[in-house]
Image (cartoon, rainbow, N blue to C red):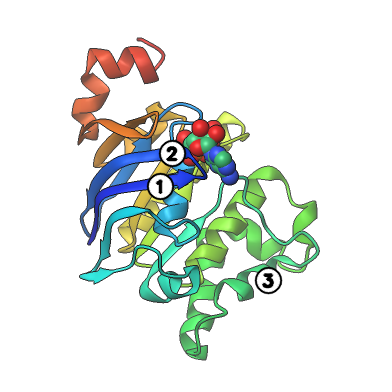
Amino acid sequence: MLKVNDINVYYGNIHALKGVSLDINQGEIVTLIGANGAGKSTLLKTLSGLLKPKTGEIVFEGEHVAGKVPQLIVKRGISQVPEGRRVFANMSVEENLELGAFLRKDKKGIQEDFEKIYQLFPRLLERKKQLSGTLSGGEQQMLAMGRALMARPRLLLLDEPSMGLAPLLVKTIFQIIEEINKTGTTILLVEQNANMALSIADRAYVIETGKIVASGLAEELSASDQIRKAYLGGH
Ligand code: ATP
């Protein structure tokens, strides 16, 4: 579905992604794990068109999309839930969700998706008129996910959905990610919470200082001593 081939991304002269390659197959949950500053967000931003690789290719469903504008990438079927949620604080829950569908014209489909999202996140239905800035952190994460889903993506990019959430809520968010995947959305999940991410993922990539240093089945990586020591708290 998605093929990233040897991309190099720079911020000025900082070389943030160094020859990164990865593949995502339709229907998978793939996780990208790595320490602070390893380049995880940079990779997601490149996939969603916010950053342009200097060299290398990104092919989504057969189309070259590297360096294309975010709007086109959303239209093609890739949506990102940014790190730190970034909901529009002065708009209601409902208005934030509407914005997620701004590139779509299929009114009926949009209505169906509203219903699906309220089913997935009943909390958002209860609060649909509430200003988003007054939602709790977990609710804002749900809203950011719902907003991305309103674009009806085939590939959903999630940047640190567990950040700053209480453990119970982290569990809920991960269950919802699995549910979203079961309804046919392919997922690329960026996480510092490697234990949780590996527990729901099919495959994983490990990134260190801008380079992919390991990849494989999530189960295999969870069992690897090296990965356990470096990313899973060593036990
Ligand atoms: P975190 O988990 O802390 O969010 P990350 O793996 O997502 O980390 P990135 O945010 O992708 O890491 O950053 C990768 C590298 O690029 C870091 O060294 C960071 O300092 C640098 N970087 C990120 N954004 C910029 C920017 N706008 N200008 C310059 N350097 C940047």
User: Label 1 to label 2, Cα distance in Å?
Assistant: 6 Å
From this view, report whether residue 144 is shown above or below residue 10.
below
Q: Name the residue under label 1.
A: 9
Q: Where is residue 27 in the image (x, y as percent from the top left)?
A: 24, 57
Left or right, 8 with reference to 70:
left
Asked whether 192 or 95 is in front, the reply is: 192
Q: Residues within 10 Å of mark 3 (few under 14, many from 20)?
A: some
Q: Which of marks 1 and 3 is nearer the N terminus?
A: 1
Contact, mark 1 vs mark 2 (Cβ under 8 Å): yes
Residue drawn at the location 78% of the way across and 63% of the way down: 130
Name the side, left or right, on which 140 lies relative to 25: right
Q: Quadrant of the N terminus?
A: bottom left
- Image position, residue 23 (x, y; %): 22, 50
5 lies above or below 61: above
Q: Compared to 14, does 53 lie above or below?
A: below
Asked if ligand 1 lies within 8 A of label 2, the reply is yes
- Residue type, label 1: Val
Q: Nearer the viewer, mark 3 or mark 2?
A: 2
- Sequence-first tag of 1 and 2: 1
